[in-house]
Amino acid sequence: MSAETIDASRGARRTFVASRLGSLLAVAPLGVWTVNHVWDNLAAFQGAEAWQASVTDHAHPVAHGVTLLVVLLPLVIHTVWGLGRLKSMRPNNERYGYFANLRYILQRASAVGVLFFLGAHIWLALLRPRLLLGHAEAFSDISHEMHHHMPTLVVYLLGTLGVAYHLANGIGTFSMGWGLAASRKSIRTIERLSYLVFVVLLAMSWGAIYALWRAGT
């Protein structure tokens, strides 16, 4: 076996492993944490104290640090992997106008939007309050911004739309990539599950945004 063949084989294995790892991290822990985080934000319907207890308060600083590690490290890995896939994407929608090809484009487009949204959200909601202000994000601050600063409201509406689509569609690609959906029947089942996840997650996200917006009055 030639050196070129060996290198090609190793490169293919690395690509295979990276693809499986990147898609796995998107579902667990990132997908699981995202759903839980959105659920916690629904506490805004119960008022400031309930929201602070669910979203920003932690029983111990170590627990907060572990949470950040479990979430941010996989997020960085998934982002690096996703950027590599963006560079190699070859859309063919003009030649083949299938719905699956449209989902392919939307998945990559939503990835770019979600990347900017999460960058802004992590800085404004997590890092800036703690590093510059010395405390966690206050309910009064985020609710005021939602109600009185239209760009913030629009960014959160569009950002959560992108997150809901990216995660829901990612469940389908994860299932097919890992061999969980191989037959036509199982693929259709996974597609229906993806649609359901998208609708439920988006409804939860926009519900939390509405609660924050309403509290901003």
Image (cartoon, grey):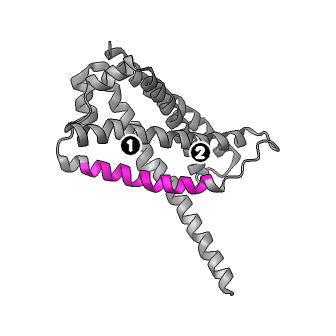
Quarter where residue 192 is shown:
top right
Q: Which mark is residue 162?
A: none
Of residue 35 and residue 62, the one placed in the foreground of this image is 62
x 22%, y 48%: residue: 63
Q: Position of residue 90 (x, y in %)?
A: 71, 52
The magenta stretch spans residue 67: yes
Q: Residue furthest top?
A: 217
Badge 1, how many Cα within 10 Å: few under 14, some, many 20+?
some
Q: Residue furthest right?
A: 95
Residue assigned mark 2: 172
Q: Split into 4 quadrants, where in the image is the C terminus?
A: top left
- 111 left or right, relative to 156: right
Of residue 40 and residue 133, the one placed in the foreground of this image is 133
- 80 left or right, relative to 35: right
Q: Position of residue 56 (x, y in %)?
A: 25, 35
Dot 1 amino acid type: Trp
Q: Split into 4 quadrants, where in the image is the N terminus?
A: bottom right
Residue assigned mark 1: 33
Give, as a single range, the part of the protein colored magenta.
65-86
**On screen, residue 18 above or below 105:** below
Q: Which secondary structure type mostly characterizes the magenta part of the structure?
A: helix
**On screen, residue 209 above or below 159:** above
**On screen, residue 23 above or below 168:** below
Mark nearer the N terminus (1 vs 2): 1
x 72%, y 48%: residue: 91
Dot 2 amino acid type: Gly
- 115 left or right, relative to 177: left
- 45 left or right, relative to 49: right
Quarter where residue 188 is shown:
top right
